[in-house]
Image (cartoon, rainbow, N blue to C red):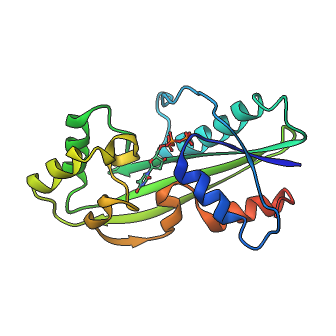
Amino acid sequence: MTLVLASQSPRRRELLAQAGLGVAGFSFERVNPDIDETPLVGESPANYVARLAVEKAKAGLALCGHIQAPVVLGSDTIVVLDGALLGKPGDKADAVAMLNALSGREHEVMTAVALTDGDRTLCDTVTTKVRFADLSRQDILAYVDTGEPMDKAGAYGIQGLGGVFVEAIDGSYSAVVGLPLVESRRLLAAFSLI
Ligand SMILES: Cc1cn([C@H]2C[C@H](O)[C@@H](COP(=O)(O)OP(=O)(O)OP(=O)(O)O)O2)c(=O)[nH]c1=O
């Protein structure tokens, strides 16, 4: 079997390498599927994030014709505030609005990870509570100017400069960054990959 990461995210690549801790010769290939990330009408955030992880894994599998016995991992991360989904900001103004909304409040980060070999698909979703400090307008504008928020759900990266906004976290740090390590290891073990 060959493990394949269906992601273009450098963070997921690093986290998946970390998930192979202690396993001699642990390695994986990469493919980059392109899927439609539009939420379905009335779809809950939990259903949405799990559906996208599974769709990324399945779309990735379709790109694995050249790979021997592929098992494909897909993942998706969203931020949920008051039940509403915050994806990646469309532009700087959108990033400012998201960070304003998150300021001084608690939100949830949901990350789903899915593995498929074509016959069997397993998916796990991890929810982490994150509480932001009160942010000044100057904090927000300076952060958005760094460019860091633009490719990240909720317009921040806990692992980067955005870490200064995080007052408390209850759950999985690696899931917030993009791939829950404990749960990913469980799924990798279920496919005998570690
Ligand atoms: C909240 C938060 C999100 N993020 C990132 C994780 C995800 O990469 C991104 C959410 O976008 P995703 O659509 O989950 O993933 P992606 O487009 O980056 O990568 P791919 O679909 O190819 O796997 O936000 C952080 O890096 N740090 C954080 O603190």
Residue at horizontal 22%, vertical 51%? 143
Please say if 12 is above or below 147.
below
Q: Is residue 28 left or right of residue 8?
A: right
Q: Is residue 159 left or right of residue 117?
A: left
Q: Is residue 54 visible?
A: yes
Residue at horizontal 51%, vertical 30%? 37
Residue at horizontal 75%, vertical 29%? 63
Q: Is residue 83 visible?
A: no
> Which image quarter is the C terminus in?
bottom right
Please say if 1 is above or below 65.
below
Residue 160 or residue 99, whichever sits in front = 160
Q: Is residue 69 left or right of residue 53?
A: right
Q: Is residue 164 left or right of residue 3?
A: left
Residue 167: x %, y % from top left: 28, 71
Residue 51: x %, y % from top left: 61, 39
- Which corner quadrant of the image does residue 117 belong to? top right
Please say if 142 is above or below 41.
below
Residue 162: x %, y % from top left: 30, 59
Residue 187: x %, y % from top left: 75, 59
Residue 16 or residue 88, whichever sits in front = 16
- Which corner quadrant of the image does residue 182 belong to? bottom right
How many marks overall? 0
Residue at horizontal 84%, vertical 47%? 2
